[in-house]
Amino acid sequence: MLMNSRSDAIAARPLGQRRGFSQLAGLLAAWAARRRSRRDLAGLDKRLLRDIGLTPGDAAREAAVPFWKV
């Protein structure tokens, strides 16, 4: 079978293998979003933290959680 493009190569793979790539991409996107959220949370001042109902200690604890943990 002659494959002309990357999408042909992916389509030729078994369904389970294609689903694995999709799940991995979703996991990496979730990790990136968590990392950004926690980094942004760490950068908020006391006034903004108070607006969202968090103390500086709450924010520091959450920001210290590794991105791979929920």
Image (cartoon, rainbow, N blue to C red):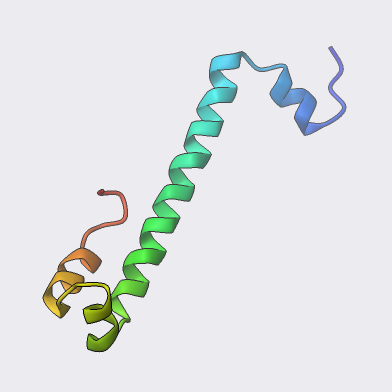
As drawn, is 29 to the left or to the right of 11?
left
The quarter of the picture where residue 36 lies is bottom left
Residue displayed at 29% across by 83% down: 48
Seen from the viewer's position, the closer of residues 8 and 61 is 61
Q: Where does residue 59 sit, x and y in percent of width and height?
A: 20, 72
As drawn, is 49 to the left or to the right of 40?
left
Q: Is residue 30 above or below residue 26?
A: below
Seen from the viewer's position, the closer of residues 62 and 1 is 62
As drawn, is 66 to the left or to the right of 11?
left
Residue displayed at 70% across by 25% down: 10
Q: Is residue 12 above or below residue 37?
A: above
Q: If the image is split into quadrants, where does the N terminus sit?
A: top right
Q: Where does residue 17 sit, x and y in percent of width and height?
A: 55, 20
Residue displayed at 46% across by 46% down: 28
Q: Where does residue 21 sit, x and y in percent of width and height?
A: 55, 31
Seen from the viewer's position, the closer of residues 28 and 33 is 33
Q: Quick one: which residue is furthest to the left in this view?
A: 57
Residue displayed at 25% across by 49% down: 69
Q: Is residue 24 above or below residue 13?
A: below
Q: Is residue 1 above or below residue 24?
A: above
